[in-house]
Image (cartoon, helix red, strand yellow):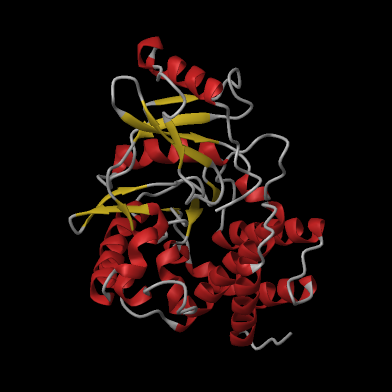
Amino acid sequence: MESITKNRQTPETLKAMVAKAFGPDEVPVGEDFAAELGHGWFNVAYRIRLRGGREVVLKIAPPPGVEVMTYERGAMDIELASLALIREHTDVPVPEVLFADTGLELCDAPYFFMPYIDADNIGIIEGALPPEELAAYWEQLGARNAELNAIKGTGFGPFLDPRFPTWRAAFTQMCEDVLADGERRGVDLGFDYGTVRAVIAEHEASLDEVTEPRFVEWDLWPSNVMVKDGKIVCIIDHERAFWGDPLMEAGFCGAELPAMSDADAFARGWGRGPLTDTERVRRRLYGLHLILIMIIETDYRGHTDTKQYDWARGLLVELMTLFAHKG
């Protein structure tokens, strides 16, 4: 996926990064040691073969001159802290951080190395999977996601700054940040921004049921799941985590937007039954927040193809209709 947030580096800089992380004896020879992993949407990632033969992945944050959405600021710091927390409190398989550098000496942005995982990415192979096999993966994913959600926090909101005493305060600020990002760039939602704000305000009391902050991975889509021999062997990309309501996890999206996930299989794995009426309202709000991001981020990432924008606009109409609002 192409995006102006991808901070590509020269072979010489990549070799310097390898030397700093693993020592001069592991610096590759020649120019064909690195291959970009193009499936990601935000950071650039390279599969690198070290001189000794071991393969690693290098992930680099966006360059400082590229404006990102408010919630994406400091994303790599969030990922590194999330990985440490997950490894400390769960046995969910996540990458080991082999080396991280935030000093900005070799590169204008933070970066880190992790092992290369020799496995299939569900997001790449899902189209070739039988429905029952894909559903089984969604169920496994639900179980793993529940382990992550069992981690308790001290406050609601950003992972590194859980400053909100209530989930209502945290989530409504998250929505306002996204809407302000869209207004700043003049992104056309197909709805007036004031109308969207009114919908959120009308239903925000449903958020008050959530009284305990939990670790929310939020970006746990099939494209962030590596599998081998029918099992999940690694979950990648932890940069969008926050403290909030587990019902906001990606796997539950299909409860209100069926095109987004197999919510039934995910919920079975997670260990919960059908949503209550109030939970369905919350899930619609969470879907609204996500779809707003999917529309607005196309401007921030410099997309020239309107496929994502058009698709997300259609989902926004679907959600606003559920909220009894039409464009």
**Whole-percent x and y of residue 101?**
50, 23
**Is 155 or 73 nearer to us in this picture?**
73
Q: Is residue 45 above or below residue 192?
A: above
Q: Is residue 40 above or below residue 307?
A: above
**Whole-percent x and y of residue 76?**
53, 37
Residue 313 visible in the snapshot: yes
Rendered-image quadrant of the C terminus: bottom right
**Whole-percent x and y of residue 23?**
39, 12
The residue shown at (53%, 40%) is 44
The residue shown at (19%, 59%) is 230
Examine the image and state in which quarter residue 123 appears. bottom left
Examine the image and state in which quarter residue 50 appears. top left
Q: 312 left or right of 233?
A: right
**Whole-percent x and y of residue 227?**
27, 54
**Outermost residue, top direction?**
24
Residue 270 visible in the snapshot: no
**Outermost residue, left direction?**
229
The residue shown at (26%, 74%) is 130
Q: Is residue 17 above or below residue 324?
A: above
The residue shown at (43%, 29%) is 32
**Is 126 or 108 nearer to us in this picture?**
126
